[in-house]
Amino acid sequence: MAEAGIGGAALSPGAETTMAEKLWGGRFQRPTAAELERISESFSFDRRLAGAEIRGTRVHAHRLRQAGVLDAAELAALERGLDQLAAELDGGPPPAPAAGAPEDVHTYVFQRLLAAAGDAARKLQTGRSRNEQVALDLRLYLLDLRPEFERHFAALLTALAGFAEAHAEIVIPGYTHGQRAQPISLGHHALAYAEMLLRDRERFEQACRRLAVSPLGSGALAGAPLAYDRELAARELGLERASRNSLDAVGDRDFVAEIHFVLAQLGIHLSRWAEDWILYAGAEFGWLIIADEYATGSSLMPQKKNPDALELIRGKAARLAGNLMQSLVLQKGLPLAYNRDLQEDKPALFDSLDTARDCLALAAGVAASAGVDARRAARAAADPALLATDLADLLVERGVAFHAAHAQVGRLIAAALAAGDADFRALPEAELQRFLPQLPAADVRALDAARCLARRDILGGAAPAQVRARARELHRFAARTDN
Amino acid sequence: MAEAGIGGAALSPGAETTMAEKLWGGRFQRPTAAELERISESFSFDRRLAGAEIRGTRVHAHRLRQAGVLDAAELAALERGLDQLAAELDGGPPPAPAAGAPEDVHTYVFQRLLAAAGDAARKLQTGRSRNEQVALDLRLYLLDLRPEFERHFAALLTALAGFAEAHAEIVIPGYTHGQRAQPISLGHHALAYAEMLLRDRERFEQACRRLAVSPLGSGALAGAPLAYDRELAARELGLERASRNSLDAVGDRDFVAEIHFVLAQLGIHLSRWAEDWILYAGAEFGWLIIADEYATGSSLMPQKKNPDALELIRGKAARLAGNLMQSLVLQKGLPLAYNRDLQEDKPALFDSLDTARDCLALAAGVAASAGVDARRAARAAADPALLATDLADLLVERGVAFHAAHAQVGRLIAAALAAGDADFRALPEAELQRFLPQLPAADVRALDAARCLARRDILGGAAPAQVRARARELHRFAARTDN
Amino acid sequence: MAEAGIGGAALSPGAETTMAEKLWGGRFQRPTAAELERISESFSFDRRLAGAEIRGTRVHAHRLRQAGVLDAAELAALERGLDQLAAELDGGPPPAPAAGAPEDVHTYVFQRLLAAAGDAARKLQTGRSRNEQVALDLRLYLLDLRPEFERHFAALLTALAGFAEAHAEIVIPGYTHGQRAQPISLGHHALAYAEMLLRDRERFEQACRRLAVSPLGSGALAGAPLAYDRELAARELGLERASRNSLDAVGDRDFVAEIHFVLAQLGIHLSRWAEDWILYAGAEFGWLIIADEYATGSSLMPQKKNPDALELIRGKAARLAGNLMQSLVLQKGLPLAYNRDLQEDKPALFDSLDTARDCLALAAGVAASAGVDARRAARAAADPALLATDLADLLVERGVAFHAAHAQVGRLIAAALAAGDADFRALPEAELQRFLPQLPAADVRALDAARCLARRDILGGAAPAQVRARARELHRFAARTDN
Amino acid sequence: MAEAGIGGAALSPGAETTMAEKLWGGRFQRPTAAELERISESFSFDRRLAGAEIRGTRVHAHRLRQAGVLDAAELAALERGLDQLAAELDGGPPPAPAAGAPEDVHTYVFQRLLAAAGDAARKLQTGRSRNEQVALDLRLYLLDLRPEFERHFAALLTALAGFAEAHAEIVIPGYTHGQRAQPISLGHHALAYAEMLLRDRERFEQACRRLAVSPLGSGALAGAPLAYDRELAARELGLERASRNSLDAVGDRDFVAEIHFVLAQLGIHLSRWAEDWILYAGAEFGWLIIADEYATGSSLMPQKKNPDALELIRGKAARLAGNLMQSLVLQKGLPLAYNRDLQEDKPALFDSLDTARDCLALAAGVAASAGVDARRAARAAADPALLATDLADLLVERGVAFHAAHAQVGRLIAAALAAGDADFRALPEAELQRFLPQLPAADVRALDAARCLARRDILGGAAPAQVRARARELHRFAARTDN
């Protein structure tokens, strides 16, 4: 993409471009090198901006009419041409480029419009540059994706909430440092990720609102020398306002980096969820059953059922993080305003958008279809190690200082281990009384993971009632989004 | 930092810790390896969280009183102890650790409180873990920095707006692709960076609001088994609400990554500004004068005046980007909930906060003190190449299609160059008429950069009136922040 | 790519795969979800490994014959099939996938072989897994690219050396801190980048040698249970040796990350060169002329000549750095051995290889065709500020301590500036004598940039003789590579 | 660090620096801003380069003597001063800076030398700049660390080899996709990481050799105007050769980025090992026992034993990766030659060196002290799922095509599962014969993990003999390094 206006290819659509034909070719003696042509074309990836380019061009045409650059007939011809092109594309991108393809989406739309609307198309570049066109197209394109992303967020939130409701009483060990710590439930665990997603979604929304700014009227860098109502153009585009500095409008890409960050952080969250569920689905943990649809087998090892969907989700986080880094490196130390380097922002952005959307959809599918092996969960949850804290808490309730209580429980556990049985509840009553004189043995014996869980009946806690309540809130939230 | 409760060092403050003394040492036979002690201590960097730890502890104590864990006298003793410790630190961090220092800030505060308030301190760990303490402290610490960052943003915005107002009519070449494109002004250029900063500031604010959530009551991971009003605790801490899932509250660090991103993007913006101003201050561009205070000389080369402040700002962007990447890598694929890996989040976060604050302050100083060499600016702005687009526009105003106008101007420029003078305005009138029959020669001769600038009197455009208007808005905005 | 063996699609090539047909489908009740199929296919990008897959398969077949798994007729059939497939592809990749395409390149080759060689193909998976196949294919693919990269390195080195030889006496200011420092030459400057390239090339070579290791015989992860001469297989593949641990062989990708680093560092070097040359080609510096072939114009601004090739090269450095980061994040914390996450290593690797190769080629083209505006260079080189250090050096040669000499020169320069002329050489002789009593005025007046340059006749210094000597060495070096 | 020569602070050591005193202060009217002074000082971190600075200065002094700049007495005085300073520091860094500290290590050494050797010190800056001094110091500093790193590599290799030898027959499940795949041994698993370390170590060595190049004689950027034997200086410094371009020598930092990459890749490898061992030490896997010295407990949960050392190692990988990214971003698009941005290279480099060294040491400690729970390993290894592939292989040995064999085994496993017992070996003989008519039931029943392991007696395979042989090789390798 050259910086401004429309390349001379427009002059002879379809024909091979020579320097003589190029609008900017006047001062050039020799044709562009083949390796530069190849590396600098962007139509192969920016063609997905065609819909945005059409809308932006339409609004620009209206403003040019107001500024007196176009007359009514010219505007009407352009509108018909834009209608025709929009109908033809029907929301999709133009076909992949073949030989003789335009160098970028702006040239593509111009060429098509020239064919459809005639010379009026040649006036469109008045006061407009490709620098601002691409800045606008990217923004419109991102905003177009917003409903789709909202649906994907809602679908995954719904799946997690549904899983949580269904398994609010399936006790599993909670882990810290990768070691069994205290009982939680599978539902409680799933909701932790729902909270993360809510924040990712909020970040995405705020980024979208921040970028809903129109650069139209910024020209190549200094502003269009036209009587041009930029705020009206913004409103006609469905954007919140016009940008306030033309150099900033055509030269900055922080909105691209921000979307990258939002998606990368989403990817990191999903990678943690994937890691947990891969473990839970393995032979050692074993309480999660990945649906057949989201696993594959091995032709070599007949027993294998591999959680490929989750592994791919985990791996894609790397892609999203790498793309974020690219976006930041690209802009570091770059002088204002537009530089051709910025063309490089698009492949990575499109890749991250596709990747994040696919990961959300895949995650929703995995979460909605996963089953539970309650027997394996129960076996793990029966580990008495999970009860140690609560046993100390029982002593605290009887007036023992926590510090002393911890010591008493520690000695009891040591004694149970020494007796060859890790379950302190199985010790003889006399033993229990010796270590825990403040507590009836029955209270000790009555301790189990489900009781521990029920005691966490605090906002955000692991108690089933809390998990169900939050799951219902999430369902309501997701339902609102879905409509 | 071990995960929960308070390390046994508390039992014998000042003395060398032995395993027997460690609260968690019961099941351990051998003392911790020296290399693990060294790599795992965090007091050397987390001591700056002491103020937050004190405030969090106070609120927690109140909730424990409500839950019946502390009696009134214990609460009073703890409050006195906390008052005393707060007064002693007076907003600053505890001194740098020496031998025998506590392993982390939580142990430090506990030890001091034990000394000041006695055994009541031992009850503080009821239902509380260091996992949630550090999650809370980090949030409070970040929110404490908010006013300082707002002031720094305001100071830089003020400096840029002041510079813009003062130099709204100093015409310089605007650049695209690093080549002279159209006239802008030094003021217009400075305001482009003000717009970027406004967005950085908004992102910072939104990140702060999002993280203003209290984890108190989350326990080690499953929620505190207490009658504990978590929303009240949040309000008492000045936070917006209590977190909704205990695993998420102690195990996620997306708020750290988000702050990193906000600061990295700020750094990237400042790196671009620094790049531009370094160029402008060099012999080739030459229209910017860095104040002596922000430059250094060379002992080898007597003529040198180096823009070190700007170079350092440009370089610091790399540090901020690297820290962001660290934060994402740290969390990638990490199972829930707390893992010791997360201790690594703090050095990079503190480094980025310090770095970004220093860069903002330094940038404000550079911008507020910079001078202008109007003669050098005028010489560059006199380049007739900058007028080419506007000359074509003049033809368009006379009814020539832009496309034809561009060609006419191209031929004129080529002729001027061939005649050995790059300034087409200096061609004989007959020549001008031959190339531009639609235009009086006087109009061509009247064309200059200032006129081009004035024609960009569009919202966000380069015209001095637009620049001054926006600068005044920014002044008002910054003034509001400053109060 | 599932982990091991060949997917069941093989059983009915061309037909739609059902679970019943999948070799690993026995324990699965429901078909793979469409979104998993889409996200998990790799043939769209790994098809470029087909040549490597064919060679690896051939060597494996020979080893299976030796191990007694294949008989002579089977081996012969397979060899014919492989010959046929290789001839058909003729070094290129298979065509882009359409509906019903195999999921990966391994399946593709197997299906084609099954059609060409019959049931013998079914024995190929004995003791072999796709885990090791892809580990081998990637290595062979990288090594195949080595000569091409060597040629590109040589071409760019040749272009830089040629440029340096031609312009060894074109004096330009050398810069530190972006400020004019001492005279250098355009040739000396170009050779700095040649040195960087030599190191990039050496790193590339060492990385290639390190990865020239054969995983064949590693099986899915534990080693093939066969009498299989792994070292012989390595030799037959043209590799240096067999890997020493089967888990490492199928599970590690450090060689991918290393190639990424080598290419990212190359990209960073090229970004610095591009930055310098973009500046040099701009109106302010102005002594470099980018050939028309490597620049583009603007349809809006008739005067523009944009250095797009260099801007794109600068921007591509971000892509290479982002891909490196992806590669590291992908592997961070990943358990051994093969995980599906690793499938993600290929798109980024191929992208970096293509990008780096294109950048090298483009840079060579730009460097080989660039011209010089000697007049502009001379004007800049005439800046007396560049002579200050050498003037002090002249005093040192007359016995003045450098420290005192520096002060004397400083005072002289200040006096010249105060006299309204920056050129101290133009001061009256009396003045010169007053400031520099140790030095004949004629010596001061004789000082110029060319003389300063000539004084740097030290290994690696800026003197034309040094530059030419080094350029000749580089030519010889590149010529050796080219053959 | 200013660019060249020695700052004027030298003139009045200990006193507060004023601009009048600064050597480069002549053309400056106002003193440096406090915020620039603070952000630009480097002595707080570059003081660890003091030893390198002393050695570099000594060699430079010898070359100045040869060039006739110093006389014999001056050289002798300087040598005595350098001896004295070296003796005083005794290999360590100067003490941390207090108020009035020099701005960088170069100024520090100069000031001390001025005090010790008098005015001869003032001649040292002849033809030398801090740009080249710091480029040299960094290289010498890195090379100084080489033996220490080699020892750490050797220690960890030794620990892994020792662990592998001891546990070459402790069978555990091998995993792909996080699922049980085939039997391996704990020893085999440990050796996979030893292979990775060998490559990390080789990369470190090659990077060290590549950077063993002397910039001395490069001056500020253009080469020293002296008769100065640069190759002799390189030899005297113990370096391999002199650099070949002065701009490259003072302006490039690829050697810093390369060390970062080597350490980051090492960190990624260690993070994978840590992840595996954290899992193995958890309740679910359970066959690894982390020594008490490398674990911590919890004051809240008496049962906890947390693998903090491994978690920290895993987390530190993020730090190393972030530092690498910083190093690349720093240099992206930076014009030649020295820019003050480059000062930022040191904190991250020192941090990565310290971090990597600590991680190696900690890992060696963990690996050397870890124990094994053979009972837990045996229980996991008894999973018949691990035998499925080998059962198919037995059929292959009897002439069944692998494809058919796989199907037979699949049906057998399904039948065993349907019969309520996952162990197909426990099926009645008639059943076994029905599914596997080619195989004596006794052969099926004899199948166990140890036998499977033993069958992998192939180079790099899991068989105990292979593991022991490779462990012995590693021991010999590490022993050579250690001496």
Image (spheres, coloured by chain):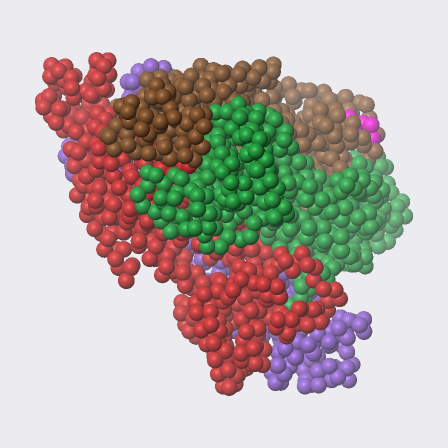
Chain colours: A green, B brown, C red, D purple
Q: Is residue B382 left or right of residue D345?
A: left
Vertically, is C32 above or below C63?
Answer: above
**Which residue is drawn at the image coordinates 15% and 25% (left, top)?**
C395
**Which residue is drawn at the image coordinates 33% and 41% (left, top)?**
A28
Viewer-proximal residue, B124 or D313? D313
Q: Which residues are magenta?
A: B62-67
Measured from the top left, where is residue D202 in percent x and y?
41, 56
Measured from the top left, where is residue D376 in percent x and y?
69, 62
Vertically, is C378 above or below C432?
Answer: below
User: For residue D138, what is the image quadrant?
Assistant: top left
Instruction: Evaluate whether residue C28 shows in this view.
Output: yes
Measured from the top left, where is residue D403 in percent x and y?
63, 77
Question: Exactly how many numbered labels are in the figure?
Answer: 0
**Which residue is drawn at the image coordinates 76% and 37% (left, top)?**
B244
User: For residue B49, what is the image quadrant?
Assistant: top right
**Does the magenta run of residues contain D374?**
no
Instruction: Evaluate whether residue B220 shows in this view.
Output: no
Measured from the top left, where is residue A175 in percent x and y?
71, 48
User: For residue A254, what is the image quadrant?
Assistant: top right
Viewer-proximal residue, B152 or C471? C471
Which is the main secondary structure of the residues drawn in magenta? helix
Q: Is residue B135 left or right of residue B446?
A: right
Viewer-proximal residue, A367 or D97? A367
**Which residue is drawn at the image coordinates 44% and 37% (left, top)?**
A3
Q: Is residue A393 left or right of residue C322?
A: right
The quadrant of the picture occupied by the C terminus of chain A is top right
Viewer-proximal residue, B410 or C165? B410
